[in-house]
Amino acid sequence: MLERLKGTFRKVDTNDSGQIDADELMEILKLFFKGAAVDMVQKQVTKLIDTYDKNANGVLEFPEFVEMVHYGDFWRRFDFQIPIALQEAVVSLAKGEPIAASAASKVAEATEVAEEAQEDADAAAVNAEQEVAEAAAATAKAEQEAQEAAEAADRAAQEEQEAAEAAAAADIERQEAEAAEEKVEEAVAELEAAQESGDAEAIAEAEAAVEQAEEVAAVEAAEADAAEEVAAVEAVEAVEAAEVAQEAAEVAAEEVSEAAPIEQAEADAAADVAVEERAEADAAEEKVEEAVAELEAAQESGDAEAIAEAEAAVEQAEEVAAVEAAEADAAEEVAAVEAVEAVELSLIHI
C-alpha cells in the first residue's frame, strides 16, 4: 500500500523533484474539483501546503503528502479504498514511525483485504469506462442509422413522386395517341365519302389527309409507348426505394431499441453520481455548521487559542464546502445533459 502511495506521489510530482510544489498540487486539485473556480482551488492549495508543510520549505515531501491524503480526506479521490486503521498505519510508516507487532499483523491483514477491494474497484472502474464507451458508440450508431433511414425515406418519397409524375405524363401521351387515332378514323371516313362522290380532287385531298393523320398517330403512339416504359421503370425504382427505406427503418429501430436502455443506464448512473456528490456537499455543509458551533463555544469560553483554531477550522470547512458544492453542481449538470440525451434518443421516431 505504501508503494502504491509512492507511485501516486510520483505521478503528482511531474518534474521528478521528489517534492510536490504548489503548481503540481494545483493541477491535481483542478482535476478533482472540475466545477470549482480557479481562485477557490488556489486558496485550497495554499491552505493544504500551509497545513501539511511541517518543515516550512514551501513544498510537500512524501510523508507530508501522505498526511495530506489522510487528514485531508483525499484517499477516495486518489482511488484508495482502505480501512481507517490501515490508513493510520500507512501514515505512521510514511513518517518512519514503528508500529507494534500485533498492529503490524492487523495491518498486513487489512492491507490484503484493501488490495483485493482496490483490485475490485479498479476492475469496476475499467468496466464502467468500457460501458460508457459502448453506450456512446451505440448511441452514435443509432443516430447514424436513424439519419440513414430518414434519408432513405426521403429518397423513397422522391422516387414515388417521380413515378407518379411519369404515370401522369404517360396518361397524357396515351390520350394524345388515342386522339390522333380518332383523327385517322375521321380522315378515312372522309376518304370513303369522297370515293363515293367520284370527285377526283376530293379523293386526292382525303387520301393526303389520311396519310398525314396516320403519320401523326404513329408518332403519338410511339411517344405514348415510350412514356409508359418510363413510368414502368419509375414505378419499379419507387418500389425498390420503398423497400430500401423500410429495411433502413427496421435497422434503425433495432439500433435505437438497443441504444436507448444503454443511454438511460448511463443517465441513471450520472444521476446517482450527482446524488452522491450532493450528499458530500451537504455533509461538508454540516461540517461547516459544526465548526461554527465550535467557534461559538470557543468565543463563549474566551480562550483566544481555541478561538483562533476554531476560526481556522471554520474557514477550512467553508472552503471545502464551496469546492464540494461546485463539484455537485457540475455533476448535476452532467446528469442533466445525460438525461436529455436519453430522452432525445427515446423520442427518435423511425
Image (spheres, rainbow, N blue to C red):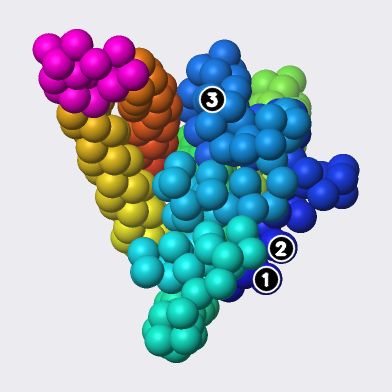
Looking at the image, do the residues carrying marks 1 and 3 touch, with CB atoms under 8 Å apart?
no
Q: Which mark is residue 232?
A: none
Q: Which residues are magenta?
A: 291-307
Q: Quadrant of residue 261?
A: bottom left
Q: Secondary structure at mark 2?
A: helix
Looking at the image, do the residues carrying marks 2 and 1 touch, with CB atoms under 8 Å apart?
yes
Residue 302 is a magenta residue: yes
Query: On screen, 143 above or below 26?
Result: below
Q: Residue at x 75, y 31 (%)?
A: 57
Report the residue marked by disc 3.
47
Residue 305 is a magenta residue: yes
Q: Quadrant of residue 133?
A: bottom right
What's the amino acid at mark 1?
Glu
Viewer-proximal residue among 111 and 232: 111
Residue 263 vs residue 201: left or right? left
Per the model, the C-alpha gap separating discs 2 and 3 is 24 Å
Per the model, the C-alpha gap separating discs 1 and 3 is 27 Å
Q: Is residue 25 visible?
A: no
Considering the whole magenta stretch, tell me its main secondary structure: helix
What's the amino acid at mark 2?
Gly
Report the residue marked by disc 1.
3
Q: Quadrant of residue 94?
A: bottom right
Q: Is residue 313 visible?
A: yes
Q: Secondary structure at mark 1?
A: helix
Depth-wise, is mark 2 or mark 3 nearer the camera? 3
Report the residue marked by disc 2.
7
Query: On screen, 245 above or below 312?
Result: below
Sequence-wise, the earlier of marks 1 and 3 is 1
State which quarter of the image contains the N terminus.
bottom right
Per the model, the C-alpha gap separating discs 2 and 1 is 6 Å
Sequence-wise, the earlier of marks 2 and 3 is 2
